[in-house]
Amino acid sequence: MTLLVIIAIVTLASALAAATLGNLMHAALNLVLSFLGVAAFYFFLDAEFVGLVQVLIYVGAVAVLIVFTILLTRRDEEKKNGLPWGGVLVAFVVFGGLIWAIVKTPINSIPTPHLATLPVHRIGQILMTDYVWPLQAVGVLLTAALVGALILVMEEKP
Amino acid sequence: MDLDQIFVIAKQQVLAWLTGAGASVGVVQVISSLINIAAVLAVFLTLFALISVIERKVLARIQNRYGPNRVGPFGLLQPVADGIKMLIKEDIVPRRADAIVHFIAPVVMCAAATLTLCVIPYGRNMTPVAIDGGVLLFFAAGAPAELAVFMAGWGSNNKYSMLGAMRAIAQMVSYELPLLLAALPVVMITGSLSPDEIVAAQGHYSFGTVPHWFAVTPWGAVAFLLFFIAGLVESNRTPFDLPEGESEIVAGHMMEYSGFKYALFFMAEYFGMFAVSGLGVTLFLGGWNSPVSWLEWIPSYIWFFLKLSVLLLLFLWIRGTLPRLRMDQVMSFAWKFMLPMAFVCIVAAAVWHYAGRGLIGWVWSLAIVVVAYLPLTKLLWTGKQFAVRQYRFAE
């Protein structure tokens, strides 16, 4: 339980730091820490596969992508702007919506389901049978993104 | 006493003694994990010390010189001297460096490398962390290592470091895909992400002599080669050591590190090499299984470490033989050759499976690999003529 609280505090603190730090690179690295914290939560919930995929995708791919983007686009050192009020407004609206949804959901009426830990083997089977169409759709989407990226960087023949 | 299980039994006895002495279940669990961690660290730190001197010896022999031979017999105590030197060196942090990031980078790198070592089965019942998604954990633990390299390069606030880190990330990201895809056929065929089950699936023999290792099948052999090459890149070894490129960018991301932090980077790199070789052995070379059935009396961990040493010597041999590639060559090799071949491996493995996993499947998958390989190399052929180089010296 104490471990859970510590992880929660670290996750939230690093997420807050990621949102507020002026140094973009520090913010990105803090975001990685909060990704890892979320992965730790998945492990606590016995969702081993989801936790590992979280680390693999978010730390291995998304974070590296963010870091690269910062590197390639950084023109001048951290410019201090005022608070981006539009962003604040959107954040509050989303936050309010989430709170409203959570309050509206009758949590206590759901009996705690007794779930066995899903082995990786079973996840693969379900993905390949029940969820094969969503899987294929995601595959097509990613391929389209890849092809698009290739077209963007392709050298134009004179 | 069964020699094969001697370490397992020893650990069980320690735990049984602890339980008998009145330790609670939680404490025993923690101690059990600690024993595993200590064993992994002890074995691989020793191996690290050994390989650092063996590497210099082998390289020296390849280059026609003696190598370290002053400290201890045959220079075997060289790592001790190196360690002491590293410890008493001044720890220099550049004034403009980002002190925190600069400090954390080697730590993260080391932690990630050590974590990858934990999922490999070193012998029968000898997997430090036996979880269901072990192979996935291996690749997931490799992800922070990439970030650590980047942190080192960026935190040093030096353009050579930054260039090294950019190169490192570019090639690591590019080769992670072939690495994963080369491991995929094995996962597909065994239907499991657990290294233990993958090893168990390779533990049979035809006619008592031909082991059922995946490297014996055509798709397995190709996938193993791809895996090995991608492993070379992931551990930043020659001919893919562009991130360090001594002649161009000094030492890349490790440039501003001295003393023990540098030693940590060095260690993490070797740990990464051990881990990738270990996973290669696990996935393709039958793990701790013996190559022929009548040698099964030799303990499983001895087989594992024999295979591991063969792969490590291959690493050293390649380092002593091949020159460094150019960045565009590294990239185009990954995307134009490795990736298509990895896909072909997946198809060939599927055909092998549906043709009954026997001789017919073997021939079919060989045919698929060859049919894909020939046009691919034809397409990538640059038509460059290679002749014996004419050396011209100042006269």
Image: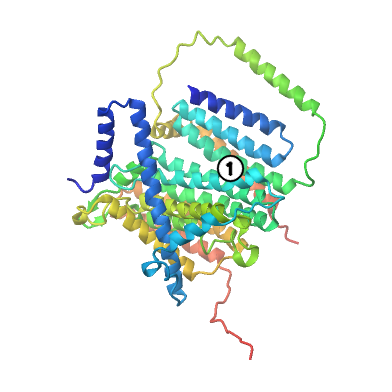
Q: Which residue is drawn at 80% across and 39% down?
A: A79
Task: Please identify the residue farthest to the left as the structure is shown.
Answer: B1
| Type of amino acid at the residue the image marks with label 1 | Ala
Indicate whether B327 appears above or below A57: below
Residue at 54% of width from left, 61% of height from top?
Answer: B240
Q: Is mark 1 on a helix, strand or loop?
A: helix
Rendered residue at 40%/67% (across/down): B75
Residue at 43% in and 30% down: A126
Front residue of B291 and B157: B157
Q: Where is residue B174 in the image (x, y as percent from the top left)?
A: 57, 52
Can residue B216 be seen here? Answer: no
Q: In this view, does B130 lie above or below B305?
A: above
**In the image shown, does B241 or A61 lie closer to the viewer?**
B241
Where A80 sits versus B223, above or below?
above
Q: Mark 1 points at which residue?
A: A61
As rendered, which of B145 and B28 lies closer to the eye? B28
Residue closer to the observer: B264 or B228: B264
